[in-house]
Image (spheres, rainbow, N blue to C red):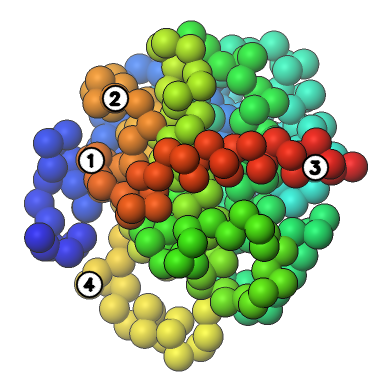
Amino acid sequence: MPIGFLKGKGPSGFGYRSTAEQVTEGLNLAGKTYLVTGSNSGLGTEAVRVLGLRGARVLATARSEDKALEACKGFSGEIIPIALDLSEPASVRAAVAKVKDLGHSIDGIIANAGIMALPTRELKHGYEMQFFTNHIGHFILVTGLLDRLAADGRVVALSSAAHKGTYSEGVRLDDLSAEKGYNNWQAYGQSKLCNLLFARHLAKRLPKGQTAYSVHPGVINTNLGRHMNRVFQGILNTVSPLVLKSIPQGAATEVYVATHPAAAAQGQGLYWADCNVETPSKHGQNDALAAALWDKSEEIVAGLP
């Protein structure tokens, strides 16, 4: 099977080189409301821009309202900035409260924000930082807003093909602080597997009409990779025009899955890449692991300040 940039278009009619504007062409999202995390840079900013371009109201979150405002300055549509630090439960709960106060029904949540490959082990509230920020922060946010999700609302969790590079156990449920050893890429892969499993299990819990998906955006040279060593970053910069996606291309799958009528017809809890359904790793298909992760996540959240 050809690697990403050599693939043609898939069954959806879109593929590796499709952009967020292209996959939403002809859609009218007026009257709909979407929440996007990580709106201050990269894929999040592009998702906000295109959703607004199609007429949607967008709740754009960043670590501060000022950062969201600055990044989304001049965009079409109604853009509402919301402060959200996914690594701080109090900030996440405050964001949930603000969204509820606004009173809008939410047609889609795009859980886009994240951190990647921290060079050294860092903890947040006693848990490895990537796991806590990428998964637990979004877990608190999304579960806190489920009562605001529209009858046909969708949750889109940004996973990654990196979920295939996690630890041999998939998710180390007995060592989420990485006390047994820390590998930056395996820890990142674990957090992305958690995003995938969260969406997979959430889809089973949602009432008929609502659903959740996970997506691999592709490999994009954004500031998410700021912790890569200089040699690897140099290689990325060299090959970028040939094989890496642009930011508009990288944002395509999450926007397509959140908005396009054809995406909802494919089924629930699926993993997507290049705007088409893909098969995740064996861990990504493990429903027992997904259920165990959900239970562990509820336990963690219950114990947070």
First along the sequence among labels 2 and 4 = 4
Mark 3 or mark 2, whichever is nearer to me: 2
Labels 4 & 3 near each other (Cβ < 8 A) = no
Indicate the amino acid at tag 3.
Answer: Pro
The Cα atoms of the two marked residues, 2 and 1, are separated by 12 Å
Q: Nearer the viewer, residue 52 or 34?
A: 34
In the image, which disc is placed on residue 267? 2
Residue at far right of view = 305
Q: Quadrant of the N terminus?
A: bottom left
Q: Which residue is mark 3?
A: 89
Q: Quadrant of the C terminus?
A: top right
In percent of width and height, residue 265 lies at 25, 20
Indicate the amino acid at tag 4.
Answer: Leu
The Cα atoms of the two marked residues, 3 and 2, are separated by 32 Å
The Cα atoms of the two marked residues, 4 and 1, are separated by 22 Å
First along the sequence among labels 4 and 1 = 4
When asked about the image quadrant of residue 215, the answer is top left
Q: Nearer the viewer, residue 222 or 3?
A: 3
Indicate the amino acid at tag 1.
Answer: Asn
Indicate the amino acid at tag 2.
Answer: Gly
Q: Which residue is mark 4?
A: 242
User: Taking 35 as reference, is 68 above or below it?
Assistant: below
The Cα atoms of the two marked residues, 4 and 3, are separated by 40 Å
